[in-house]
Amino acid sequence: MGSDSEADKALKEKKKLTSLAPIAKPLAGKKLRKRTYKLVRRATEAKCIKRGVKEVVKSIRRGHKGLCVIAGNISPIDVITHLPILCEEADIPYIYVPSKEDLASAGATKRSTCCMLVLTKPTKGELEGEVQEKLKSDFEQVVLEVKELASSLY
């Protein structure tokens, strides 16, 4: 069979958006979603990422800073309801993306992931100068857009 037609892609996108949890705000738009996934990919390559609720919560409580990316189609929703509050208390920006599967593929894992914390630097060791600069510039760009989106909501 061939690749998905435009109608199939639109249908899949609509399905993702209808399975969203009611608390999934601020939700990343199409451009911001692509940039966020790109940032997650870069952070994964540089080993500057924490995956899953337990790891993310532990990192936030230890004082690590970064960007929290949360999937909006988690069921039951109780699994992630405490994350936005935790992020706000720690002054960490957070953004929802529609699909846990897409988030997992951006983070190079086979299992779907409900949240990830993108760190500005790895917990162990240091990065090369060029890799650090690219990651930092992508991070700052996404965080700026996330903050603008969050301020327009509240």
Image (cartoon, rainbow, N blue to C red):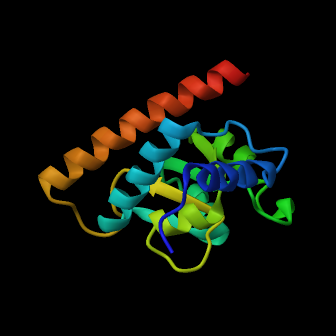
Residue 10 percent location from the top left of the image? 64, 48
Q: How many marks?
A: 0
Q: Quadrant of the C terminus?
A: top right
Give the side of residue 15 with respect to residue 62, left or right. right
Residue at left offset 61%, top offset 69%: 113
Q: Quadrant of residue 100?
A: bottom right
Q: Does residue 130 appear in this view?
A: yes
In this view, the residue in front, 109 or 4, is 4
Give the side of residue 87 with respect to residue 2, left or right. right
Q: Specify the farthest residue to the bottom.
A: 110
Q: Specify the farthest residue to the front.
A: 1
Residue 87 percent location from the top left of the image? 64, 45
Give the side of residue 65 with respect to residue 88, left or right. left
Residue 35 percent location from the top left of the image? 42, 43
Residue at left offset 71%, top offset 23%: 153
Residue 1 percent location from the top left of the image? 51, 75
In this view, the residue in front, 74 or 127, is 74
Residue at left offset 33%, top offset 58%: 42
Residue at left offset 78%, top offset 54%: 82
Give the side of residue 113 with respect to residue 125, left or right. right
Q: Specify the farthest residue to the left.
A: 129
Q: Does residue 72 appear in this view?
A: no
Q: Where 29 sits versus 64, above or below?
A: above
